[in-house]
Image: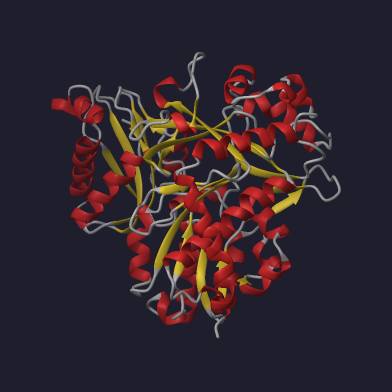
Amino acid sequence: MSITSIIRPFLVKRAGRLDRYATQTADIQQRVLQQLLSKAADTEYGQRFGFDSIRSYDDFAQRVPLNSYEELKGYIDRMRHGEKHVLWPGQVQWYAKSSGTTNDKSKFIPVSKQCLHDTHYAGGTDAVCLYLRNNPKSRLFDGRALILGGSHAPNYNLPHSLVGDLSAILIEHINPLVNLVRVPSKRVALLADFEEKRDLIARRAMQCRITNLSGVPSWMMAVITRVLEFSGKDTLDQVWPHLEVFFHGGVAFTPYREQYQRLIPSQGMHYMETYNASEGFFGLQNDPADPAMLLMIDYGVFYEFIPLEEVGRPDAHALPLWQVECGRQYAMVISTSGGLWRYQIGDTVRFTSTEPYKFVISGRTKSFINAFGEELVVDNAEKGLQEACRLTGARVSEYTAAPVFMDNAGRCRHQWVVEFDKTPADTEAFARCLDEALQRINSDYEAKRYKDITLQRLELISAPRGLFNEWLKSRGKLGGQHKVPRLSNNRDIIEQVLAFMPQAPKQG
């Protein structure tokens, strides 16, 4: 009897309970809100806004303000220095280091013990539950899991307090039993030097019976490419014949899908998207045939959503989950058991279903191009690249794009820096296909491109292999959960990337 067959009944039972998401959404979410408020009523923040007298969602929305990181930063800084009962009861010892804000290089997201267990670990467990329900013949636990993570460091030298990648915090505190079925060892997993860690992981993992992978697609690709180099094999199923699933998240999988399918040609390989951010675990792909993810509504997270057109306005109005509509773009707002209250996470989503609530990540509130009224979001970019790759046979590994407001000839356009895993025979044809696809996908972009009056055809710069990793390395962000910003409404990021070109192109 396989180990998986013994464990399966305990996990699949939970998967069945998730079916109530379709009919009990409002009840579940209101219960989560009351639990959060009750738990934090005696904190400084809870007393300031009278959590103990909030009786309904309307009370909560009227009394507690919407917050960005800047509004909560002062509280979090005090918590990092050891103060207790500030945003969440007790002393929060762990902080997930995330990408920065306008004013800071990094954000530090509090991760309480409750948040670690009722949100992050719960999400990982449910990912396995749903996968096993969808794949009755799985032998997931009859081998090892290759799980990638970042690194952490002491937080202000406070005892037992850590700051670093969320993945490193998860690995540091994971149940010891899990270490029996995962690689690499904790020591290797938490190494700060990604290149050293990558090689150590590859050499160790290629000797193991790996059945599943977990991590960010870009960094996992770096590891499995190394595995193939060390092993001398052409495809990964020659190294790991029992490999059956990749639990991926952190960045959109679309640019990487073809590369993975090429390196893992096995018909028995599965892919499952997860939405596990520093702030919480929010979504899981529960149907392999549907790219939309199930919103996880019974963790320690209460959700609200701001219509995208209202984001940034002082009169922005958030909606509870049970009032959102399919097809509209929303910015996500969360309240969590880590002490984030009505926190605007920065991600935008679009719901595809409300029974149960399923969604796709459409981009970032600050990751878009709207320099000329085109309102290009990451979801548009991913679909456009997918179509251009299909038509030209190319494969994209990394990219970033930004506007050129006016060059020496008075022309305005979008400039794309694209690193190819497989370069198209004709990069001009790729650029044309991408531009035409974006016009089909986005009517605002199409309108601005009309007769080249407002916006000229996009410019494509083909980057040499490894350019984006060099840029990330220069910023101390190679590995872990760090990712390349895709779209930007200014030229700050693209100019930094272009500086690493052998001959840096000029804007004009």
Residue at left offset 49%, top offset 71%:
226
Q: Horizontal placement of 415 versus 88: left or right?
A: left
Residue at left offset 25%, top offset 22%:
410
Percent across and percent down for residue 9 are: 55, 70
> Is 492 placed above or below 453 here?
below
Labels in figure, total: 0
Q: Which image quarter: residue 228?
A: bottom left
Q: Horizontal placement of 117 versus 232: left or right?
A: right
Viewer can see residue 354: yes
Q: Nearer the viewer, residue 229 or 188?
A: 188
Q: Nearer the viewer, residue 393 or 236?
A: 236
Q: Horizontal placement of 482 versus 175: left or right?
A: left
Which image quadrant: the C terminus? top left
Residue reaching furthest to the left:
451
Which image quadrant: the N terminus? bottom right
Residue at left offset 43%, top offset 20%:
310
Q: Identify the colour scheme used.
A: secondary structure
Q: Horizontal placement of 328 versus 427: left or right?
A: right
Viewer can see residue 105: no
Residue at left offset 22%, top offset 59%:
393
Percent across and percent down for residue 167 are: 62, 54
